Amino acid sequence: MITATPRKDLILMAIFTIAVLTMPIWLAPIGASYPDLLQRFAIFGIFAIGFNILFGLTGYLSFGHAAFLGVGSYTAVWSFKLLSMSVVPAIIFGVITSGLFAVVIGYISLRRSGIYFSILTLAFAQMSYNLAYSVLTPITNGETGLQLALDDPRSLDNLVGVAATEGIPPTNFFGIEMSGYSGFYFCAVLMIIGFYISMRIFRSPFGMMLKAVKSNSNRMSYTGLNMRPYTLTAFVISGMYAGLAGSLMAVTDPLAGAERMQWTASGEVVLMTILGGVGTLIGPVIGAGVIKYFENIFSAINENVLQGIFSFLPEFLQDGVVAVLGLFVGEGWHLTLGLLFMLIVIFLPGGLVEGFSRIIDRIKNRSKNGEADPVGSAKVQPGE
Amino acid sequence: MGILEVRDVNKSFGGLKALNKVELDVEEGSVHAIIGPNGAGKSTFLNCLVGLLIPDSGSVNFDGSSLLGIKPHEINQAGVSRVFQTPEIFGDLTLLDNVVIPTLASRDGAFKFNGWKRADQDSEIIGRAEHMLEDVGLIDKRNMTAGSLSRGDKRRLELAMCLVQNPKLLLLDEPTAGMSRADTNNTIDLLKRIGERGITKVIIEHDMHVVFSLANKVSVMAQGTVIAEGTPEGIKGDPRVQEAYLGGAHL
């Protein structure tokens, strides 16, 4: 087990920052360097980092975090409509509002633990989703989704005399338009800050108490610790991360729809966290990246692309290979993701991060043992 | 006046009367053993003291205030720590973290949000925790995961987690059950050393060797009630005790 020291954390932070900011360069060879996708990497990275503070540390599995994503989005769009096209108030209000929602939902849901907690959060999220389509239509604009309009008040912008434009003005950060690469860098910097905060929490006495909740809640009570405020604080913090992610979705694409609150979105962040590594710092970010990559790149591969790749094969083989692989790409990308997810849960319960650390351990062992290590053991051994 | 005063405590589970008018006085600084055959209600009684069970009637006063109706963490903050029959530890965490957590709990109270400090840079807390681990002889294993310890070591760790809080009253539920003779003797020595700190102890124990080497007062429970009380020597010769506890056999 590697013990964390301030120095090691600083190095980790530096590597993380550089890796994130250079994503447009090193993701180019695998076709993932276009701004739209990069933005999504960063936004879902934030979502997953926050989710991991709750799920990874306390073990409380929320199935309703998409509700906070939606709340963040709606709040941000309303801020654009009513106040200003500047992203600063949009993000601040998005985070605060989802935090308030999290206080209420968390206060009620955290009265139970385990599966009952999960069901309660799921119920709240589905309730929000359905309300957004029905009763709350004046706020959410129902199925059409909440959009900007030319005649929005934008009172702050008018107050400071931002010049009127022909169309709807773009969202901006002190004049910088939040689309394309500048949008990505904005999200990326927020993700780096979010990662740093999560690291501080992981290393703090507070984080240690959250781990204690997961490990043995009984002992925790008999040690004189009140579990409820600890779990509630973690829940609210992770809800605020989700709200930040939601408002960033609105920042990069200023509209908000209720489908963002559907249970599938809540499920997605659970998958991301488990795929990357529950309770690890970096895992959720990797998980978010992998899932968004599959969703966008694998789904774009069609039969023609496959024909191209396997054109070196004789024709009858080529058709066969393409027919089989065709099941796993394009619309079938969920199948690939599903298989990957199953493999990871069965063989690497610690997620991709566990896989990486095993590989590193093997390399270290091999360099220690010289050539004593046969090739066969390089394979991952189940049940290890 | 004892530090712990139990008056007329009753507890039933359905038709079974688990505790029947239990009375107990524990004097400050003493080591008070509760012995009795299986099913006598010893563990039920202990559970009523720490808030795990709520008695149907009666009163439990500790250090001048009632322990009934308050939550387990409040009971601990009032100065009562408990060692369980099967060790309750944080199995996924390191030994050091296991001891750091109760140390923090006794310094910072039931809840404190300090998400920005580094736990491993708090030298006061780490120092106290390491000193405690050294006391129970587990310092060499400080970075091991607690779940991987042997049963005896888990008990010692749990004891360390309780002791580091400097409780006024320590409740021990069969602290040597399942231990080898050597481990048992080590634990007795350890508990004797704690005795020097003046922590009041209530011990539930089957092992008479442990009881007679530690306790200065013994209460005997049978069928949910205290049937005899006295010094270890006095208890040994009490015919009622031999009847209930040993089925008439002689010690």
Image (cartoon, coloured by chain):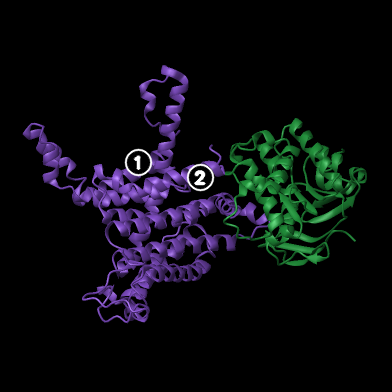
In the figure, A318 relative to A194: above or below? above
Q: Which mark is residue A10?
A: 2
Pick the quarter of the image with the C terminus of chain A. top left
* Label 1 Cα neighbours within 10 Å, binned few <14 / some 14-19 / many ≥20: some
Measuring from the top left, give residue B243's x and y in whole percent. Answer: 84, 46
Share a chain, discs 2 and 1? Answer: yes
Q: Position of residue B215 (x, y in %)?
A: 86, 45
According to the picture, the residue beneath numbered tag 1 turns out to be: A343
Amino acid beneath label 1: Leu
The answer to whether residue B39 is left or right of residue A338 is: right
Name the chain under label 2: A
Task: Give the number of marks.
Answer: 2
Disc 1: which chain? A
**Colour chain A appears in:** purple
Q: Is residue A332 left or right of residue A8?
A: left
Q: Colour of chain B?
A: green
Residue at the farthest left position: A315
Q: Quarter of the image holding residue B250?
A: top right
Q: Please provide percent x and percent y for residue B238.
A: 91, 46
**In the rendering, at what x and y percent does residue A262 appear?**
33, 65
Using the image, determine if residue A157 lies above or below residue A14: below
Specify the amino acid type for callout 2: Leu
Q: Secondary structure at mark 1?
A: helix
Residue that appears at 43% across and 39% down: A354
Question: Foreground residue, B9 or A186?
Answer: A186
Q: Callout 2: helix, strand or loop?
A: helix
